Amino acid sequence: MALIVQKYGGTSVGSVERIQAVAQRVMQTVKAGNSLVVVVSAMGKTTDGLVKLANAISPNPCRREMDMLLSTGEQVSIALLSMALQELGQPAVSLTGAQVGIVTEAEHTRARILQISSQRIEKYLKDRKVVVVAGFQGISSTTDWEITTLGRGGSDTSAVALAAALKATCCEIYTDVPGILTTDPRIVPEAQLMNEITSDEMLELASLGAKVLHPRAVEIARNYGVELVVRSSWSDELGTKVISPQPQSRSLVGLEITKPVDGVEYDTDQAKVALLRVPDRPGVAARLFGEIARQNLDVDLIIQSIHESNTNDIAFTVTTPILKRAEAVAQAIAPVLRSQNASQEEAEVMVQQQIAKVSIVGAGMIGRPGVAAQMFATLSDAGINIQMISTSEVKVSCVINAADCDRAIDVLCRTFEVNRQESLSKNEHIPIQNQKSPPVRGVALDLKQARLAIRQVHDRPGTAAKLFGLLAQHNISVDMIIQSQRCHVVDGVPKRDIAFTVAQIDAEEARRVLAEAAAECGWGEVVVDSAIAKVSIVGAGMVGQPGVAARMFEALAQHKINIQMITTSEIKISCVVAQEQGILALKAIHTAFELGSDQQIQVPA
Ligand code: ADP
Ligand code: ASP
Ligand code: MG
C-alpha cells in the first residue's frame, strides 16, 4: 500500500463545494488502495484577511501574536475537510501542527522545521483513517511550546517535510493552475504547462517570484529525494514533476537546518572583461551581448552595476581561450557607445586575466543570509579580496585572483566542512540534466524587491563580509549583490559602490542598519529604491549556450526598457528594471523565448 501526501492550497479549499470536491478526490485515492495524509491551507484568502485585521489594530504587530492569529486559518479547514470525509463515510481525523509534533525553531512567522514525529500519524493510518494536517504551522521545541508559522506560502513546505519524514511514496501539491507553467498565467495567459522541471531550476523560479511552490518545499524535496508533483485540483491532468538528483542520505533531525553547503567548486580558467562608463539607456547590453553572441562566444557571469552620473559598468567573464575574441568585440563597441554618451565621458574596456571563480553550493543556504556572509568572512580572514559576487539560490560565487584560488578552496572547505578531495573543478560540475533542459525553462517576475546601494565602500578584504554579516545578524536575506567595477581613489583609499536587492519589507531596516555602519566605517551614502521590478529567466540548458543573455536583453531593448542591474548564475539571468515596466518586461521575455502556447490557461478568480 503506497503512502501519499496530498496538499490542497487556499483556492482549492476556498468554499464548502470545493472542500467537498477535495474530499471526493481524497476518497478516490484511498479507494485506489493508498494511505493518505492530507495537508491543507486556510480557506481562500483567509490568511490575507487575518493579516489585514492585525494591521488595522497595529502597524507593527508582535510576531508571536501574528502566529497565534494566522495559525487559526488552517485549523478551520482541517476540521471542515475531516467532516466532509466523514460525511462520505471515510474515517478521517484532523490534527494541528502541534498535535502531529511538527517541531520548529522558536522564530515566529518564519520558523524552519526541525523534526516531525511520525508515531501519531502512523497510528491513525494503521486504523485506516485519512489524517488531515494543518499546513504552515508547527510548535517550537522550547519548554514554552509556542505556536509558530513557517512564512507565507508555507503549507507546501509542511507537505513535503511530512512526505520526507514519513518516507511517503510521493507528495502531490494540488493548486489552482494545471501545474508549473512557463510563467504566471495570471499575468501571461499564454503560459504553457511543463511536464517536468529539475529541482535546481524550480528552486530558482520559486525564489525569483513564481509562488506556485514555496522554495523551501523544493529544497526539502531536493535534499531528501521526495517525489514531488504539482497538479490542478480541478482536473485529472498529470501536472508537472519536479525532478531531484539522487540525494545523499541525511538525518531527519534538523530537517530544514541540515548542513547548508554540500560542496565547493572552482574554475581557474576565467578572465574578466569590463566596459566602464557605458551610457545608461535601453539597448546597450543588447548591443554588446548581441555582438558577442553573433561571434558564438559563450559568456559565464554577467553583472551590471548601479549607475552613477548616467553611466553604467558592465562586466562579464569568459574562459581564457576566447578572451581575445571577447575583448575585441568589447573594444569595437566601446567607441560606438562613447560617441552616444551625452556626458562625453569615455567608455573604457578593462581586461583582467588570472582570475578564478570559487563557489559554495547547497540547497540548505536558502533563506539563510548568514551563509553568504560566512563565505565572505572566510575569504577576508585569509586576506583574499573579492572582485565579483554572483548569487543564486543554491550557490554563491566569488571571482578572486587566480593566485588565491588554492587557498580559497582550502579555507572554504574547512569553514563549511567539505572534504578538500571532494571540491570540484569546473569540468566536473556540469549541472544535472542540462543536456535535456531547454535553455530557458521559465520566466519570473518579482515586484516585491527593493534595491539598496552604498556609495564608496572600501575596496579591501573584509568589506563584503562586514556588510552582509550585519544584514545576516538582522535576519535580512540579500538577493542580487553587485560590486561596481569602477574604483575611485578617495584620499588615497580605493573605494567602490556596492548594490544589492532585499525584500521590500526588509528595506527600511536594512537601510537603518547600513546607515549606522556607514557612519562608523566612513562609507558613503546609502540609497534605497523600492520602485523596481526583477525579471528573470531560468533554465539549466543555458549552460554553454551562447546568445541566451543577448536574446533577453534584446527583447527588453525592443520595448525600450532600460536595464538597471544585471546578475547571472549558471542557470539564471536576472535584470532589475523600473517597477512600472515589470509586467511589460515579463511579457516581452516570455514571447522572445517562444514560451507561449495558443491555448490560454484558465485560472479561477
Ligand atoms: P495555493 O493556494 O494552491 O498554494 P498559490 O496562490 O500559492 O496557490 O500558487 C498558485 C499560483 O501561483 C497560481 O495561481 C499562479 O497565479 C501563481 N504562479 C506564479 N508563477 C507561476 C508559474 N510559473 N506556474 C504556475 N503558477 C504560477
Ligand atoms: N495560509 C498560508 C498563507 O496564505 C499558508 C499557505 O497557504 O501555504 O500564506
Ligand atoms: Mg501556495
Image (tube, grey):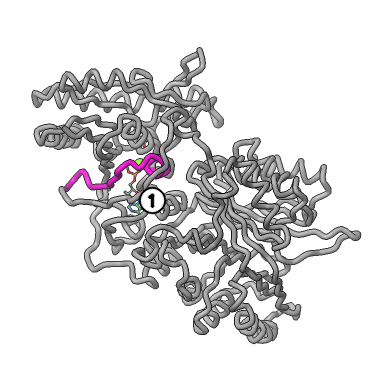
Most extreme residue toward the right is 491
Which residue shows up at 44% across the image and 62% down it?
537
Q: Is residue 530 visible?
A: no
Q: Is residue 38 visible?
A: yes
Most extreme residue toward the top is 143
Q: Quadrant of the N terminus?
A: top left
Q: Is residue 224 magenta?
A: yes
Q: Residue under circle 1? A: 199
Q: Position of residue 45 (x, y in %)?
A: 34, 37
Q: Position of residue 21 (x, y in %)?
A: 15, 37
Q: Is residue 594 left or right of residue 493?
A: left
User: Relative to the observer, which residue lies in front, 295 or 579?
Assistant: 295
Q: Is residue 232 left or right of residue 539?
A: left
Q: Is residue 442 magenta?
A: no
Q: Is residue 414 left or right of residue 548?
A: right
Indicate if the residue with disc 1 has its beta carbon within 8 Å of ligand 1.
no
Circle 1 crowding by C-alpha within 10 Å: few under 14, some 14–19, many from 20: many
Q: Position of residue 149 (x, y in %)?
A: 44, 28
- The image quarter containing residue 88 is top left
Q: Give the magenta range.
A: 218-235
Q: Position of residue 485 (x, y in %)?
A: 71, 65
Give the image quadrant in which the ligand numbered 2 is located: top left
